Image: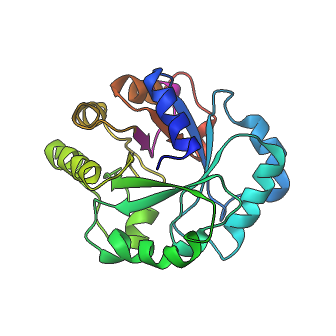
């Protein structure tokens, strides 16, 4: 059964309205500066994502609580570990790391989360998560001990995304990783978008207005930006 936040997502996609999520890493976020942070994010921001690969116990909940007090934007959890789950958020991206072969992130973490999730009212959105080589050794690779998919192998990336859809994912998330030097290439976004019929999220390494608009034109339904939300207009 689809929840209200996923239905809203689908409605925006159907209306060809592009979405922008700002990703907040609790491990690096200054709660005391929450209001000023929110005043700086782009006006077109539609969602707040909260999560990171390495987050200390309790930091996610404190971050969500601070954001809730200052913003009406929907807050989605983007957890790196089952311990990062908090009932204070609106929805959870229930991630499966499709690009890796580490069973812990294909099903292990998911099983560990169930004892908590089954008693919560969080909207759960199954998400096929695909790590793409962004030209650096990302935190995701280090934590999950998996290798990203090479950007040159578009067929493999497309097939991985389709496998995620066939397994029941409601979203596909192409991620170049934190601190990526190279965003997901437009041709990858375009080919994946043509192949799947569920919404496509793209993030990692998108730092400029040109990169953001290129990703949108290539087929991304949602762009995720982190510390680079202060977009430069000329690069």
Whether residue 30 is visible to the viewer of this picture, yes or no, is: no
Q: Position of residue 178 (x, y in %)?
A: 48, 54
Q: Residue at x 75, y 40 (%)?
A: 72
Q: Which residues are magenta?
A: 200-210
Find residue 186 and report its horizontal and vertical position in percent.
31, 31
Closest to the observer: 32 or 16? 16
Left or right of 34 on screen, residue 105: left
Residue, far front: 1
Q: Quadrant of residue 122?
A: bottom right
Residue 78 sits above or below residue 223 on the image: below
Residue 160 percent coordinates (x, y): 22, 52
For image coordinates 31% across by 69% down, the residue present is 146
Is residue 231 rendered to the left or right of residue 16? right
Residue 19, percent from left and from top = 53, 31
Query: Residue shown at 56%/69% (left/top)?
Result: 117
Q: Is residue 115 magenta?
A: no
**Residue 209 belongs to magenta span:** yes
> How many numbered marks are there?
0
The picture quadrant where one finds residue 184 is top left
Residue 233 lies, with reference to residue 108, above or below; the image says above
Foreground pick, 124 / 78: 124
Q: Nearer the viewer, residue 206 or 51?
A: 51
């Amino acid at each position: 059964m689809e929840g209200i936040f996923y239905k809203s997502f689908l409605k925006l996609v159907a209306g060809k309205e592009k979405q922008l999520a700002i990703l907040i890493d609790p491990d690096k976020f200054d709660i005391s500066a929450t209001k000023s942070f929110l005043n700086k994010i782009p006006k077109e921001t539609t969602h707040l994502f909260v999560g990171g690969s390495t987050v200390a116990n309790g930091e996610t909940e404190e971050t969500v609580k601070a954001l809730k007090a200052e913003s009406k934007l929907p807050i989605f959890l983007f957890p790196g570990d089952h311990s990062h789950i908090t009932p204070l958020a609106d929805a959870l991206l229930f991630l499966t790391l499709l690009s890796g072969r580490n069973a812990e992130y294909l099903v292990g973490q998911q099983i560990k989360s169930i004892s908590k999730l089954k008693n919560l009212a969080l909207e759960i959105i199954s998400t096929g998560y695909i790590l793409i080589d962004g030209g650096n050794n990302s935190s995701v690779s280090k934590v999950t001990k998996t290798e990203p998919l090479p950007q040159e192998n578009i067929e493999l990336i497309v097939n991985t995304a389709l496998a995620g859809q066939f397994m029941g994912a409601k979203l596909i998330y192409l991620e170049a990783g934190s601190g990526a030097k190279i965003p997901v290439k437009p041709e990858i976004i375009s080919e994946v978008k043509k192949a799947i019929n569920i919404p496509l999220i793209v993030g990692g390494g998108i730092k400029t207005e040109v990169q953001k608009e290129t990703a949108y034109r290539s087929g991304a339904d949602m762009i995720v930006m982190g510390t680079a939300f202060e977009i430069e207009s000329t690069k």
